[in-house]
Amino acid sequence: MISSPRSSIHNQKAKLAADYNDLLRQLSSPKITVIGCYTIGDTIGEGTYGKVKLGTHQITGKQVAIKKISKQHAPLMAREIHHHRQLRHPNIIALYEVLSTESAIFIVSEYCPNGELFDLLTETGRFTEQQAQRYFRQLVDAIHYCHERNIVHRDLKLENILLDMDHNAKICDFGFARHAEDKQLLETFCGSLAYSAPEMINQKRYTGPETDIWSLGIILYTLLAGELPFDDDSEIVMRRKIVNTIEPTISILALRSVSCCCQRYHNPTCPSYSCDPP
């Protein structure tokens, strides 16, 4: 059935009226529902400095993650954005763009619908060696890529590894990342204690890459054993465990891969960043 010209004009007017009313609601609401080309949806996470919302590109329909941060945290976020925007790797969350209003910063990045690697481990229990190796290879490749560009993450943990549609690992949260030039030593303790290297615990100066490598070893161990190697209710006991012990409750073959990362007196880099047993 062919619509009459009068009906077509009526439909156009109705659409314009609906669009106007939508715009009026957006402008009148204290909540920001649109930023740039993105419609802001439900909260999907919460970080140290703000909430993460699910966003949808208004033209393509592509879903993204949008982190909203108050402008008062701009100095901290500038450093994170500066490091993150230099990285383009299939196993690192893609940073698409940064938008700004008078009061807030909006970081638009890749959306990973399958949540954190931590949640998957909690749900399924410890991984098989084949499953763990798949994720470990992806993480090693991504961190090697960062280190080649003199960027150290310093907060690697299961909660900072997201899973995309195909369950590929994606490293996120570069809030503690730093540029580590040759022979430049760092001294800040940062990240999560359970994943921290002994040199951080002992308040020694460090070059940076070795702390990421240690954290990779902790991640691999945890995937295989289903629990953190040094976990304890007491922070003092946990620190002592990190400096002095490691419990070999996984296979010797897998343990050798972990040991490559978790040597107390290791070289700054694991040979060839190999995730295969030496």
Image (cartoon, grey):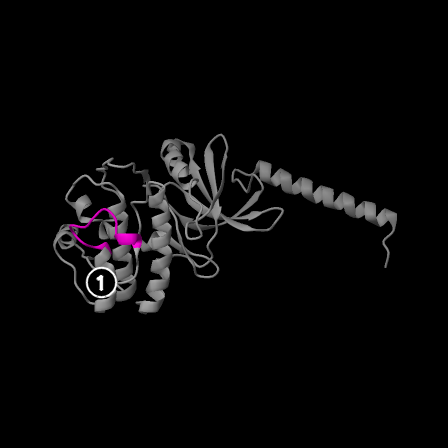
Magenta stretch containing residue 90, yes or no?
no
Magenta part of the protein: which range? Answer: 261-273
Asked whether, in this view, residue 146 is left or right of residue 166, the answer is: left
Quadrant housing the N terminus: bottom right
Q: Which residue is at a point 48% across and 51% down the rendered structure image? A: 111
Count numbered badges in the picture: 1
**For numbered disc 1, what is the local secondary structure?**
helix
Residue 86 lies, in percent from the top left, at 42, 40
The quadrant holding residue 161 is bottom left
Decide whether residue 271 is among the magenta residues.
yes
Q: Give the residue at x 21% y 41%.
A: 206
Is residue 208 rendered to the left or right of residue 65?
Answer: left
The residue under the point 22% across, 64% down is 255
Which is nearer the eye, 162 or 276?
A: 276
Q: Considering depth in this image, is 5 or 161 the residue closer to the camera?
A: 161
**Residue 252: % across, % down:** 21, 68
At label 1, the amino acid type is Arg
In the image shown, does 87 or 66 lie closer to the viewer? 87
